[in-house]
Amino acid sequence: MSELARTELKRSDAVYLGKRISRVDGPEKVAGQAKYYDDVTLPGMLIAKILRSPVSHARILRIDTSKAESMTGVRAVLTGKDIPLRFGFNIVEHFDVEKEKTIPSEEVAALRGLMPEPRPDKPPLAIGKVRYVGDDIAAVAAVDEETAEDALSLIEVEYERLPHVFEPVDAMKEGAPLIHEECPGNIAAHLKGEWGDVEQGFKKADFVFEDTFKTQHQAHCSMETHGCVCNWDGQGNLTVWTSIQVPHMLKREIARALRIPHSRVKILSEYVGGAFGSKTEMGSYHVICAYLAKKTRCPVKLRFTREEEFFASGCRLPFTTTLKTGVTRDGRVTARQVTIVIDKGAYMMQGAAVAFYALTVPMPGLYKPPAYKFDAKIVYTNKLPPTGFRGFGNPQATFAIESQMDIIAEKLDIDPVELRLKNANQPGDLTVSGFQVSSCGLTECIQRAAKAIGWEEKRKNKLPNRGVGLACLFHSSGERGAYGDCDNAIATVKMNDDGSMTLFIGAQELGTGSLTGLTQIAAETLGCRIEDIKAVSGNTDLPTFDLGSYASRSLFISGNAVKAAADNAKNQILKIAAELLTVPAEELDSREGKIFVKSDPNKSLTFKEVAMHAYYGKWKERDMVVGVGSWDAPSTLFDPKIGKWKPPGMAATYTFGCQAVEVEVNPETGNVKVLKVVTAHDVGRVINPTLLEGQLEGAIHQGLGYALTEEIRVEDGKTLVTDFRDYFLRRASDMPPIETILVETNDPYGAYGLKGIGEPAMVPVAPAVANAIYHAIGARVTQLPITRERVIKSLEKND
Amino acid sequence: MKCMQSKLHINGYDYDVILKPHENLREVLRRIGFKGVKKSCDVGGCGVCTVLLDGRPVYSCCTFAAWAEGKQITTVEGLASPEELDLIQRNFVEKGASQCGFCTPGLVLVAEALLKRNPQPSEAEVRREIAGNICRCTGYVKVVDAILAASKKR
């Protein structure tokens, strides 16, 4: 932090920060000119399709691909034997060599016993057996889609059916069929820990509450489905056009899977059509497509259909959470204990990391219990494998915490707002796990959200069947440990020979607006005009690096990298200008495209004049003006010596917020109508209100779906949802009014005080809705989604 | 499999095209190069493939290409270039109605058709009109804002 002297900037001085700047990629998007991976068409390109398992659990006795191979138009068929490797999140294991781990092993060792090691359990194409309906078995590349599909039907597979298991409770029983032979009890990971003295904490409590909450499989529903186009050139370089949140990490994983140097893989991902956590890791499809392209020596495109998207691209992990909380008579939390069982489906993917986040961030974070104990089992079943999804385990955890807070409030006869204010996190707080809160506006968020929904009036003079409820959140900006002891990014700024600037960014634009926010930060820091900056990203050949756009980190981490790069470039520019103006560089500054003498602003130059001098004039050094900037968050890894984190913990900065919801419930039908949502967030500092509001509003759309309608229904291990007719997403006509409240706390770590805000608004929607329903008609629903049936059942339970 | 020779009128120009049997309009338009016609659900459930047929929005994934013969087909490319956006597109950009951008061409076209038919729609009318188009990013707030703002400026 020390090397990054923070430019303090008064709001009134800002040229671009805090302003409603239109997104830089807006014109291309509204004109239909933005090119996504599926818009790439190369000469001779083939289309690939994957043959998927029709059975839940079976040994593959025989695969005969000969008929498919001899079909006209088919160029290649692959099965498991052609790709002898297994992979998992952040790990690739080749069968013929030693494990190629991608995390520095010492750090993994440090985490052992708390966070499980990544598990390479997924062969890109089935080897030996299939583990869920939809598992990848074989792949075909053909001249067109129809031919590829026809060829799939010609592949003969002989199965020996094995007993299957669909529910985690059954999977853990003795004698249950083993889905991965090396995992007894089908337990993919078992996470346990305790901070503080929980037994003592419960003793100090006047009341102890214990409740169980269940959540469902929620689909990301990115409008652009997963897929890629792979092309090898004559020099052995592989180019992959794909839709990904982590291009640099994907480059690494694909290079490891193919055993070629990282420099030989180029990921192109300029435009991503929605991701929400589902595009944070290499998929089987990437490896399959690269192998097919290699085998056929043709470019190959592999695109998921919407149906495949529902079962093969990951979804939100379903949690069964039993939460035990001790409180004093006056409403102070004394201890929290949580037991979670997670339905991991057939493969691990990011399962352990999601569970780990839920267990270590919101659970010991929100309302800072002084003692906390956790026990979570991640259990394999013969079902679709879920993965990370906006909030990364936090919505599941917060549904339990915040639903129970209202149960506690009622029992203690304390107003839910008052109970939350009493326990609210404050700046400087240290959680029991070792997370230090830098800035925190939770109290103000609660107060303002309550006021905006009309809390006092609506609780005092309750209308029949109407209710208001609220819920809070504790999240992080960034997350150390996903890829080792780092949470970093590198950005580069280059001045061109006409004084315009090119900004190379490693963070991936997903639609969140990070490219625009980072351009604003660059323009403000450089003092150039924003229209003179061209931001380039989504290309791993650029001189940048970034772990990726996940964990609400892109503007938080890359923002500091861009600022450092811009500061660096600006110093070089001022040095050149100093020669032209014959004053020391220290006496110069720049703003809105002008470089001027601070004491005499009329003495000034344009960036173009400086560039002309540097490239074509008398500037002797003739260096290209290139500023490189990097930033690694001052966060920490879990320290096994002390059994917790050293401050500030997993992230440098934590985010807070409160949402309040008003609903009207029909007690006859159980129908819930959401009348209004207020979402109040500690955002650190607003960089662009339009984009910020967009993040909050979009998250509420997903949160309301999570709360009320969205579920990938699975029956007998088979995913029943095939398209949007079976999966209920809210349409424009179903959305309630949303009021956004932005609370600024000027965080000491984020560039210009900002915090990450991609995920937070997704987190508390479901418990806020559940609490409002309870207030409306006295139905406490503890399972998501809160369907009409569950509302009615819960009412009947009261009778 | 017998293909069919056809002529399609797209964005003001005639195109001679070969249609495969039962081929949908989306695939044909994308093959010619109109990649602004997006591909997502295949069954008329999401609206990203929306195009205008004689000024009316249709899901091109559920429209036989042959059926569009003799009709005026408008894709997002037919509206304007990124340098000279039309009023609705400009408002989409200014109001932040586009995030990942994948649903945007479809929504823009639906808005164009709506405002042509009903230049001053109410908010409820706008929401009803775009209910056939899914956006997973924006929560629709800024999309509705943009369409209403464009209608006021007309």
Image (cartoon, grey):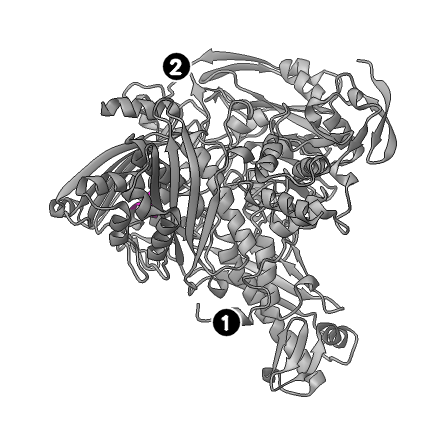
Quadrant location of the N terminus of chain A in the rendered image = bottom left
Residue at numbered disc 1 = A10
Image: A462 above or below A589: above
Residue sitting at x 72%, y 22%? B63
Which segment is the magenta one?
A: A359-363
Disc 1 residue type (three-letter): Lys
The picture places residue A793, in percent across and down from the top left corner, at: 31, 22
What's the mark number on residue A163? 2
The picture places residue A184, in percent across and down from the top left corner, at: 32, 27
In-front residue for pair A744/A280: A744
Tell me the crowding category of disc 2: few under 14, some 14 to 19, or many 20 or more residues within 10 angstroms, Cα based. Answer: few
Residue A251 placement: quadrant: top right
Q: Earlier in the sequence, mark 2 or mark 1?
A: 1
A360 is within the stretch colored magenta? yes
In-front residue for pair A415/A340: A415
Question: Which secondary structure lies at badge 2?
Answer: loop
Disc 2 residue type (three-letter): Pro
Residue A443 placement: quadrant: bottom left
**Residue A411 can be seen, yes or no:** yes
Tell me the crowding category of disc 1: few under 14, some 14 to 19, or many 20 or more residues within 10 angstroms, Cα based. Answer: few
Residue sitting at x 60%, y 49%? B96
The picture places residue A583, in percent across and down from the top left corner, at: 65, 87
Q: Main secondary structure of the magenta part?
A: helix
Left/right placement of residue A786 relative to residue B75 reads left
Query: Are discs 2 and 1 located on one and the same chain?
Result: yes
Chain at numbered mark 2: A
Question: Which secondary structure lies at badge 1?
Answer: loop
